[in-house]
Image: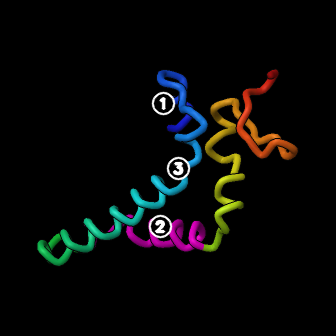
Amino acid sequence: MIAAYHAVLPLEPAEFSVLFDLIATRMAMTVVISSWRAARYPANRNYILRNNAAAWARLRRMAALSRDQAEASDSARLPCGIEICPLRMKPFRRGT
């Protein structure tokens, strides 16, 4: 999904630096909103909470990462053709 967005409107280095936080925030919101909806509509609780376990698992994996690990992660950059240069520790496009 990130690569598709990046193909239309390329992400800037500053946007990549907050992407991890934005993804974690979105997952946290999924958990919070679905929990609220499940309490509000108990008859649909199972359906509403169907993705919560996966979201919690992702949040736990993300929480286990240090800031440096999160920022150095290539999982968002590589599909966009951007790598982290270990010497510069800054994003760069392949071939530059």
Circle 2 or circle 3, nearest the eye: 3
| Residue receiving disc 1 | 5
Q: Residue at x 55, y 54 (%)?
A: 20
Question: Mark 2 and mark 3: span between their CA atoms?
Answer: 22 Å
Residue 71, above or below 33 = above
Question: Mark 3 and mark 1: span between their CA atoms?
Answer: 15 Å
Q: Residue at x 39, y 66 (%)?
A: 28
Does residue 49 show up magenta in the picture?
A: yes
| Residue receiving disc 3 | 18
Q: Main secondary structure of the magenta part?
A: helix
| Residue receiving disc 2 | 54
Element under disc 3 = helix
Element under disc 1 = helix
Q: Position of residue 53 (x, y in %)?
A: 44, 72
Q: Position of residue 60 (x, y in %)?
A: 55, 73
How crowded pointer 1 is (Cα within 10 Å; few <14, some 14-19, many 20+) is rated as few
